[in-house]
Image: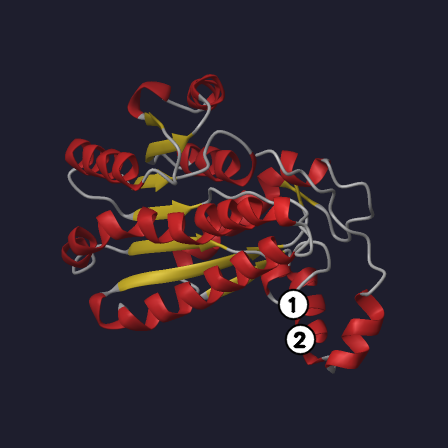
Amino acid sequence: MQNVFITGASSGLGAAIALEYAKQGARLGLVGRRQAALEAVQRSLPNPQQHSIYVLDVNDSQALSAAASNFQELCGEVHVVVASAGISVGTLSELNEDLPVFRQVLETNVLATVATFSPFIEAMKKTAQTQPCRLVGIASVAGIRGLPGASAYSASKAAVISYCESLRVELQATGIRVVTIAPGYIDTPMTQVNDYAMPFLMPAEKFAKRAVATISAGNSYRVIPWQMGVVAKLLRMLPNFVYDFAFSKAPRKSRHVEL
């Protein structure tokens, strides 16, 4: 049986990944801020009694470390850790009131990813000698090129991509595989507030199947859906002046300064 620890599990991508792993018989440790939503996810899973929930904010590194320790004690060993917790809001650098929002996005999307992985690495080094172990960072295609009006989110996801790449190289000799998954547009509460067209929009359940398959294979990096991966590569190849012209009037995510 695989033992899997997932942050951001009360909704969206985290909940979808949790369901896919539970269908495969895994034992889960589920982290989220909202107790009622997290309990609802737990009840929806096969064999709900075998899964543990931890109600906490991932920015509370002490609470997160305590949850990680508890799950390891319950399971003996952990095979997969998925850092899925994240927030996405529109931001503008010229507005002073958005500075705390920048800070919260970066802390939640980047520093909390580090805090999620950290408590597991030493024990995983031992487990990886005999069984596959994975650390999974959920990035975004928004981290491949900066999107107007989403500078905090784009910066945070670019940081997740680079962080996971650094960690992958650091841990290469240990047997732990670091997997970076960059979702495109996935149908979740995070994208349902967008009031613009979202190409290649994918149901969360379909995304989760592909994500779990990618994790199992130990692939270092994958964009899901693949069509967005093609688009992302093409955008990365564009000269700056072409990209700037094309995206200067692109639709922007609504600003929400209260998180």
Mark 2 nearby-residue class (10 Å; few <14, some 14–19, many ≥20): few
Front label number (2 vs 1): 1
Secondary element under disc 2, as helix, strand or loop, is helix
What residue does disc 2 label?
236
Residue 188 visible here = no
In front of the other: 192 or 20: 192
Which kind of residue does numbered mark 1 sit on?
Arg
* Left or right: 48, with 156 as reference point: left
Mark 1 and mark 2 in contact (Cβ < 8 Å)?
A: yes
- One can see residue 108 in this view: yes
* Quadrant hosting residue 31: top left
Quickly name the residue at label 1: 145
Furthest toward the front, the residue is: 96
| Residue shown at 66% from the left, 73% from the top | 233
- Please identify the residue farthest to the bottom as the structure is shown: 239
Work out which quarter of the rendered image holds the N terminus and state it: top left
In which quadrant is the C terminus drawn?
top right
Render colour scheme: secondary structure
* Res 218 label: none
Q: Quadrant of residue 13?
A: top right
Q: Position of residue 253 (x, y in %)?
A: 73, 47
- List x then y, in percent, for residue 55: 37, 26
220, above or below 103, in the image: below
Q: Amino acid at mark 2?
A: Arg
For this view, does 240 lie left or right of residue 116? right
Dot 1 falls on a residue whose secondary structure is: loop
Q: Position of residue 109 (x, y in %)?
A: 48, 49
